[in-house]
C-alpha cells in the first residue's frame, strides 16, 4: 500500500473519530446551557455567549483533525 | 515634548511595527513554500480581484504567466491583506470624523461598537485591563474584516492561509509575554512559570509546572492560529465546492435544455452557506480576541487581596481559578 493510499484511508476515519468526540462534547455543553437557561431565563444572554465560546473551543479540536492532513498531505505529494 | 516622544516609542508604535514585521515574514514563508514544491493542490475558492487580474490577457500573454503574475500569485493572500488593511483604515478614518457632544447617526453607531467592545473586554480584564482594549479591539476589527472578506465578491479572506493566522497568533503571543514580563517583573514571571509554589508539595512539583508552562506558551497561540485558519479555510472551501457544483449543475441544465457546452453563471447553491459563513466569521473573531483577553488576564495582578477598596466579584477575571 502506498503512503498516499494509507493517508487517504486514514484521514476520513480520523476525522470521523474527532467529529464523534466533538459531537459528544458539544452535545453536553449545549445541553447544560439549555438546562441553565431553564433555571434562570433572565441570564440567557450571558449563558448564550459562554456557550458559543465553549462550543468554538470544542469545535477547534475537530478542526485540528480536519486541517492538519492538509499540511501533511502537502508534504506527501511533494515527496512523491 | 519628551512625553510625546516617549509615547511614540511605546505600545502603539511597537505593536503595529511588530505586526508588520511578522506579516512580512509570514509572507516570506509562503513564498518559500510555494517555490519549494509546486505540488500543492489548490483548493477551490471564490475568485477575487487578483485572480481576475491574473487571468486577463495583455498583448497576447496572460498576466498570470509573467514574472509579475508569479509574484502576485504567490503573495495573493498577503496583497489581499494589505488591501483589506487600507480599506479598514479608510473606514475607521471615516467613522471617527465627527466628534460632536451630541452624536449624529454615524457617531452613535461607532460609539455603540466601541462601548460594546470596551464593556466586553473589561468584563474579563477588569478596570485595570482598559489599556488592552485598543489592542484587542483593533485585533477584533481586523480579524472580522478579514474573515468577512471571504464572502465579499472581489475580495478574499487572508485568514484562510495559515501564514496570516500564525502571524496574528505570534503577535498575540509576543504581546501577552511582554505584558507578563512588564507587569510581574522577571522574578514574578518566573515565579508564575514555576506554578506559584507556596507549600512544600508545590515546591517539589516545581519542575513539572515549569515544563508545562512552556508547553502551554507554545500550544496556546498555535491553537489560536489553527482554530481561525481551519474555520475560515473550511468555510472558503465549502463555498467554493458549492459554487462549483452550482456551475456544473447549470451546465448540465443548459446542455439538456439548449445544448450549450458550459455555463457562464451557475445556480447559486452556495447562498445558504453564506449564513453559516457569516455566523462563523463573527464567532471566530470573537473567540480569538476573547481567548487573548483570557490569556492576558491570567498574568494580571488580582486585586482581591487589596485592603484599600473592596473589589466585588465583578472585577475578578472570569478565568482566574
Image (cartoon, coloured by chain):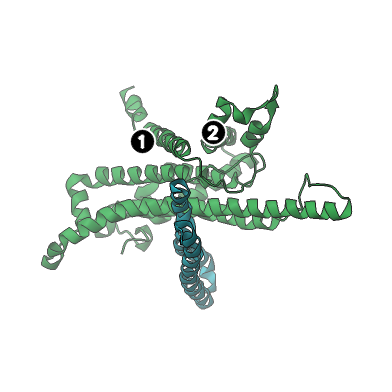
Chain colours: A cyan, B green
Coordinates of residue B228 in the picture (x, y in percent) = 48, 52
Residue where numbered disc 2 is placed = B79
Check the image and report above or below for B116 versus A29: above
B179 horizontally vs B40: left or right: left
Coordinates of residue A57 in the picture (x, y in percent) = 45, 61
Under tag 1, what secondary structure? helix
Q: Report the residue at 84% width, 52% height from top.
A: B255
Residue where numbered disc 1 is placed = B11
Check the image and report above or below for A3 versus A30: above
For marks 1 and 2, the one nearer the N-term is 1
Q: Report the residue at 64% width, 53% height from top.
A: B241
Coordinates of residue B7 in the picture (x, y in percent) = 35, 30
Graded by Cα atoms within 10 Å as few (under 14), some (14 to 19) or many (20 or more), the crowding at tag 2 reads some
Q: In which chain is the residue bearing label 1?
A: B
Is A4 or B242 nearer to us in this picture? A4
Is B188 or B59 nearer to us in this picture? B59
Coordinates of residue A68 in the picture (x, y in percent) = 45, 55
Is B17 or B89 nearer to us in this picture? B17
Q: Quadrant of the N terminus of chain B?
A: top left
- In the picture as drawn, the residue positioned furthest to the right comes out as B258
The Cα–Cα distance between marks 1 and 2, rounded to whole angstroms, is 26 Å
Under tag 2, what secondary structure? helix
The image quadrant that residue B313 belongs to is: bottom left
Q: Quadrant of the C terminus of chain B?
A: bottom left
- In the picture as drawn, the residue positioned furthest to the left comes out as B200
Amino acid at each position: 500500500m502506498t503512503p498516499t493510499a494509507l493517508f487517504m484511508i486514514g484521514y476520513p476515519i480520523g476525522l470521523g473519530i474527532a467529529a464523534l468526540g466533538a459531537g459528544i462534547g458539544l452535545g453536553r455543553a449545549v445541553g447544560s446551557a439549555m438546562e441553565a437557561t431553564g433555571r434562570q431565563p433572565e441570564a440567557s444572554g450571558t449563558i448564550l455567549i459562554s456557550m458559543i465560546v465553549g462550543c468554538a473551543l470544542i469545535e477547534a479540536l475537530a478542526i485540528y483533525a480536519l486541517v492538519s492532513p492538509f499540511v501533511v498531505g502537502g508534504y506527501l505529494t511533494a515527496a512523491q | 515634548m519628551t512625553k510625546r516622544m516617549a509615547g511614540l516609542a511605546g505600545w502603539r508604535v511597537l505593536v503595529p511595527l511588530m505586526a508588520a514585521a511578522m506579516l512580512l515574514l509570514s509572507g516570506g514563508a509562503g513564498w518559500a513554500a510555494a517555490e519549494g514544491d509546486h505540488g500543492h493542490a489548490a483548493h477551490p475558492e471564490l475568485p477575487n480581484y487578483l485572480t481576475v487580474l491574473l487571468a486577463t490577457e495583455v498583448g497576447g500573454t496572460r498576466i498570470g504567466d509573467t514574472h509579475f503574475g508569479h509574484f502576485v500569485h504567490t503573495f495573493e493572500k498577503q496583497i489581499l491583506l494589505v488591501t483589506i488593511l487600507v480599506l479598514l483604515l479608510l473606514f475607521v478614518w471615516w467613522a471617527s470624523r465627527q466628534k460632536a457632544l451630541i452624536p449624529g447617526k454615524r457617531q452613535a453607531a461607532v460609539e455603540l461598537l466601541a462601548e460594546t467592545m470596551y464593556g466586553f473586554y473589561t468584563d474579563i480584564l477588569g478596570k485595570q485591563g482598559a489599556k488592552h482594549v485598543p489592542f484587542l479591539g483593533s485585533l477584533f476589527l481586523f480579524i472580522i474584516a478579514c474573515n468577512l472578506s471571504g464572502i465579499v465578491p472581489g475580495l478574499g479572506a487572508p485568514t484562510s492561509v495559515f501564514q496570516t493566522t500564525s502571524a496574528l497568533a505570534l503577535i498575540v503571543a509576543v504581546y501577552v509575554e511582554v505584558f507578563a514580563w512588564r507587569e510581574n517583573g522577571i522574578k514574578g514571571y518566573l515565579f508564575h512559570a514555576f506554578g506559584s509554589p507556596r507549600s512544600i508539595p508545590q515546591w517539589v512539583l516545581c519542575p513539572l509546572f515549569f515544563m508545562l508552562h512552556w508547553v502551554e506558551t507554545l500550544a496556546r497561540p498555535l491553537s489560536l492560529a489553527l482554530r481561525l485558519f481551519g474555520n475560515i479555510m473550511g468555510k472558503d472551501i465549502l463555498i467554493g465546492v458549492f459554487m462549483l457544483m452550482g456551475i456544473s449543475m447549470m451546465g448540465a441544465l443548459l446542455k439538456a435544455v439548449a445544448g450549450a457546452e458550459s455555463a457562464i453563471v451557475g445556480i447559486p447553491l452556495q447562498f445558504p452557506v453564506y449564513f453559516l459563513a457569516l455566523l462563523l466569521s463573527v464567532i471566530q473573531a470573537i473567540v480569538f480576541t476573547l481567548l487573548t483577553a483570557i490569556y492576558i488576564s491570567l498574568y494580571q495582578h488580582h486585586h482581591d487581596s487589596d485592603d484599600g477598596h473592596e473589589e466585588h466579584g465583578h472585577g475578578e477575571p472570569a478565568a482566574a481559578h
